[in-house]
Image (cartoon, rainbow, N blue to C red):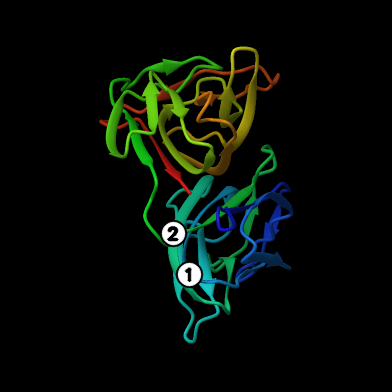
Amino acid sequence: MPNAGFQRERRAPGTIATDQAIAFNSQVVNYDTNVKYNASTFFLDGNADYYVSWFVTIKTALGTRGPSVSLITNDDPSIIYTSNNSMKTGQISGSAVIRSDGTTTFQLVNTTGQSIVLADNVDVTANISIIQINGTLKSGIVLQATNSAGATLDGGAIIPFDTVFSQINGDITNADGTISLNNDSRYFVHWTVSLDGSLDATSIKFNLVSVTETESTVVGTSESPVVLQGSFYGSTIVYAPDATTTPFNLRLVNASEDATSTNSSITLANIGIQASITIVEI
């Protein structure tokens, strides 16, 4: 599977000046030989269409406006895909579909007009995932949590996905938030969780874990400083080896912590859709 995904993270705090590109210092997935990275710039060497998803976790933004982060291409003129937030603390999440002619490059740039300060109490301050989207999707599912409005989830609790919003084929199944991948393949995963409160948590954190009878392994994570209300995002690329023989099970878990690094409860938003997760076989 030569075109099955590319993912990098930034695992460092710091201040990003206006018009400065965000540097990603940690390689997570490197399955696509046509995607390369160097000095804050991503290179798309293939003639193909790409889906790009990102989030940036911010401690504060200077100035009077909410923070803004944009994907900017090297086209003439540049194509700009902007993501922003009215709140100065929390996550910014965005996505773009890019058609590459084999010479396309892009950067993720602070376009706030002032400096932004990345969070200093989380492990992952920025994440970007890139997948090639040419061809027909093999399988996919969009799940929602719709029956837990206002519910409190203890530390370690599974996000209770209860509704299939849409599905391609039937190769991905769900049972009360335990999601089974049934093909030996790679998958792009994106999640959103909406909260009304974080109780005694000092950071909001969600872990995507793979689960067997004997152990669980974190395969993706997203974190944010505490805000009273808001939506929280994450994405990752997962490889499910031998899933045709033994289903590869995933759960999205509340891993929020208090000041003593003890798991902390959260309260889901009192809205119609409290959480969603999209999984696409790539």
Where 86 falls versus 42 (above or below)?
above
- Residue 173: x and y in percent read 38, 27
Q: Return the residue found at the far bottom.
A: 76
Q: Which residue is drawn at the image coordinates 32% and 39% (left, top)?
A: 169
- Residue 226: x and y in percent read 55, 33
Disc 1 crowd, CA 10 A, few/some/many (<14, 14-19, 20+) = some
Residue 255 visible, this orientation = no
Earlier residue among tags 1 and 2: 1
The answer to the question of whether label 1 and label 2 lie on touching residues, with beta carbons closer than 8 A, is yes
Q: Is residue 217 left or right of residue 73?
A: right
Q: Which residue is drawn at the image coordinates 59% and 36% (left, top)?
A: 221
In terms of image quadrants, where is residue 155?
top right
- Residue 121: x and y in percent read 68, 37
Q: Return the residue found at the far front.
A: 245
- Please, what is the three-letter code of the amino acid marked with disc 2? Ile
Q: Which mark is residue 133?
A: 2
- Secondary structure category for the residue under label 2: loop
Identify the residue position indicated by label 1 in the image: 48
Q: How many discs appear? A: 2
**Relative depth, front residue between 212 and 260:** 212
Residue 154 visible, this orientation = yes
- Please, what is the three-letter code of the amino acid marked with disc 1? Ala
- Secondary structure category for the residue under label 1: strand
Marks 1/2: CA–CA distance: 8 Å
Q: Which mark is residue 201?
A: none
Where 87 falls versus 269 (above or below)?
below
In terms of image quadrants, where is residue 103?
bottom right
- Residue 204: x and y in percent read 55, 31
Where 218 falls versus 126 (above or below)?
above
Disc 2 crowd, CA 10 A, few/some/many (<14, 14-19, 20+) = some
